[in-house]
Image (spheres, helix red, strand yellow):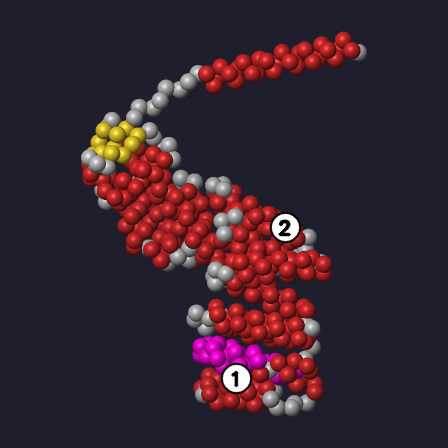
Amino acid sequence: MEDLKRAKELLKTDPESGISLLRTLIHTELPEEENARVKEAAVLALGEVLAKQHRASDLAYLVEEIRPLFNAFPKAKTAKIVRSLIDYSSLIPDSLALQIKLCEDSIAWCNEEKRAFLRQRLETKLAQLYLDSNRYKEALDSLSVLLKEVKKLDDKLQLVEIQLIESKVYHKLENVPRAKAALTSSRSCANSIYCPPILQAEIDLMSGILNCEEKDYRTGFSYFYEAHEGFNSVEDPRALQALKYMLMSKIMCNKPEDAYALINTKGGIKYTGREIDAMKAVAHAHEIRSLHEFQAILQSYRDELEGDSVVNRHIQALYDTMLEQHLIRIIEPFSKVELSHIAELIGLPEDSVTDKLSQMILDKKFEGTLDQGIGCLIVYDDPPTSKLYDTSLKFLDTLNLVVDSLFEKATQAKA
């Protein structure tokens, strides 16, 4: 233990000497009563310092070289060490490929050593890494096999994690029904056991995202609030993400004043920064209905808005809605108008205006056609609404009542 303390102190003043001493401790035979404890601490300390120094190859070699030691370790301690070293590798920038390789190699070793529990945990981690690296097919293939295996064991906590990852994958693939089904299963399992606060917050965050996909922003806000409280209680950085989604929900509900109130609360002030400034600017642009300000914000806060796919999708939808409303207001007085004049009035490039108008015509937002030969938009009057459909429905309702009446009389006659 004295050598271990000295090694940790050396890491602060002379890292290379500290690393050398830790390696020596790992490969030195120690008294049986402290062998596993000291070596575990040495391995974890060494893995952490290698990750902080961004020494990816050395960390990968460490994971491989310590495997012979695991024969003398309890299986639970082995699982903790392997998973901790893979988690440490996430401290290295752009290390997704390294993490995936470490997981795949460790899973192969688990299969050789018949360590089923650790393998299942690593496969769950690998599926999450596949998701992060946009390898959705591999993630689903891995999860489908793992899900069947874990269901047989009835390990509900791991089932919650697996089904939550599955929901995230389907959401990325824009398959909302399957994402909701997986999330419902995950939430059902979570309700039957003690669910760690972080995992519960992740479930709430995903629930809010899926509700927003269905335009139910009020319910989405409630889930984001719960997620924010959960992440904030353990100082998890994802609390900021949940707060952004809360602000987005208020903006999409046409309540920018509520967004300002959230930003000025104690919780909002705690996370003040460019992320929150971006959402505040969007709320202001939406409040004053300014397309020019909206465009300037999308440029100024590109990383903050486009970097988050959820925020980007809904903010772009909001911008498109505002643009359509402005265009309809501009063309309303005209039966025929030059595209250049519309572009001048709205202050956008003519090509962008033309593309948007053609999309609106195809979506039947208004009746008209584009004559690009002369660069004009021709607006048609709304076609007269036929009363035939309403009359037909009333006739069918009356006929239905007659048939029901005849059926009742026939039944009474038989009785």
Callout 2 environment at 10 Å: few (<14), some (14 to 19), or many (20+)? some
Q: Secondary structure at mark 1?
A: helix
Residue nearer the viewer, 132 or 10? 132
Residue at the extreme right of the image, as rendered: 415
Q: In the picture shown, does residue 233 fall above or below 12?
A: above
**Where does label 2 land, which residue?**
185
Sequence-wise, the earlier of marks 1 and 2 is: 1
**Residue located 67% across and 85% down the image:** 34
Q: In the picture shown, does residue 127 fall above or below 174?
A: below
**Residue located 37% across and 56% down the image:** 304
x%, y% of residue 195?
A: 63, 57
Q: CA distance from mark 1 to mark 2?
A: 45 Å
Can the viewer see residue 347 in this picture?
yes
Mark number displayed over residue 8: 1
**Residue located 53% across and 81% down the image:** 61
Callout 1 environment at 10 Å: few (<14), some (14 to 19), or many (20+)? many
Tell me which corner region of the image, top left, top right, bottom left or bottom right, holds residue 347: top left
Q: Secondary structure at mark 2?
A: helix
Segment tinted magenta in the rendering: 36-64
The amino acid type, in three-letter code, at marker 1 is: Lys
Mark number displayed over residue 25: none
Tell me if residue 218 is in the magenta stretch: no
Residue nearer the viewer, 161 or 151? 151
Say whether residue 73 is left or right of residue 92: right
x%, y% of residue 70?
A: 65, 80
The amino acid type, in three-letter code, at marker 2 is: Ser
**Residue located 65% across and 91% down the image:** 29
x%, y% of residue 116?
A: 68, 69
x%, y% of residue 237?
A: 47, 61
Callout 1 touching callout 2 (CB < 8 Å):
no
**Type of secondary structure dominating the magenta stretch:** helix
Can the viewer see residue 161 in this picture?
no
